[in-house]
Image (cartoon, helix red, strand yellow):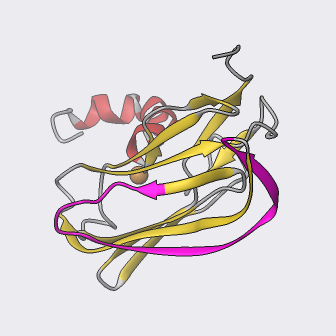
Amino acid sequence: MSWMFPRAAAALGILIASSGPALAHIGLEIGEAPVGSSYKAVLGVPHGCSGAATTQISVQIPEGFLGVKPMPKAGWTIELVTGPYARSYELFGSPITEGVTQVTWSGGELPDGYYDEFVLHGTFAASLDAGSTVFFPVVQTCGTAEEAWIDISGDENAETPAPSLTLLPADGGH
Ligand SMILES: [Cu+2]
């Protein structure tokens, strides 16, 4: 907002405060996906931690997002945590009870003034509820600083909202 004259900025203060955060935080490029479909989760990282460069992004995989595979990223090391799902699902006709539950990219450095994306691919279980909101909580580390984007209240005014998307009804046939 440095281009704005002080008086104009003050007059627009309320507007800025209410429209800024949605664009300013880590979020998913595509905000909806049908149940039972594959989904490429593209997490955009628009800033560091209060000016400090981002050095690690850790994503918690939501229940029902199956067969997760991260996209490799030059300059960053990937670490996967796997474990049992809360319940059993079906993926491509076979039962699946465990998989990736957390993905971490580390070892790189994303300056506060740059933008970058971290990508993972998976499939939403067909048994998930259409209309529900799915959250991908993210912990952003910047050296010794940390920002936890883990608020899953769904509150539009949350200060640290977890990236989320809305599930749609299944695509008809294929
Ligand atoms: Cu932000």
Q: Residue furthest bottom?
A: 144
In this rendering, does residue 161 appear at all?
Answer: no
Q: Is residue 87 above or below residue 26?
A: below
In the picture, the quarter occupied by the C terminus is top right
* Residue in the picture at 42% in, 36% down: 29
- Residue 169 falls in image quadrant: top right
Q: Is residue 18 above or below residue 122?
A: above
Image quadrant assignment for residue 4: top left
The residue most toward the front is 94
Looking at the rendered structure, the number of numbered marks drawn on it comes to 0
- Residue 30 location (% of width, % of height): 48, 32
> Where residue 25 sits: x, y (%)?
43, 49
Q: Nearer the viewer, residue 111 or 42?
A: 42
**What quarter of the picture does the N terminus occupy?**
top left
Relative horizontal placement of residue 121, taking residue 34 as reference (left or right) = left
Residue at 79% x, 40% y: name it: 128
Position in image of residue 50 (x %, y %): 32, 66
- Asked whether 25 or 121 is in front, the reply is 121
For residue 84: magenta?
yes
Question: Is residue 85 shown left or right of residue 22?
Answer: right
Q: Is residue 60 above or below residue 65?
A: below
Residue 147 figure quarter: bottom left
Q: Which residues are magenta?
A: 69-92
Q: Which SS type dominates the magenta stretch?
A: strand
Where is 91 relative to 4, above or below?
below
Q: Is residue 35 left or right of residue 148?
A: right
Left or right of 153 in this view: 38 = left
Question: Is residue 94 in view from this perspective?
Answer: yes
The residue depicted at 71 percent of the width and 51 percent of the height is 64
User: Along the line of sight, which residue is nearer the eye, 4 or 152?
Assistant: 152
On the image, the x and y values in percent for residue 119 come to 38, 50
Residue 34 belongs to the span the image colors magenta: no
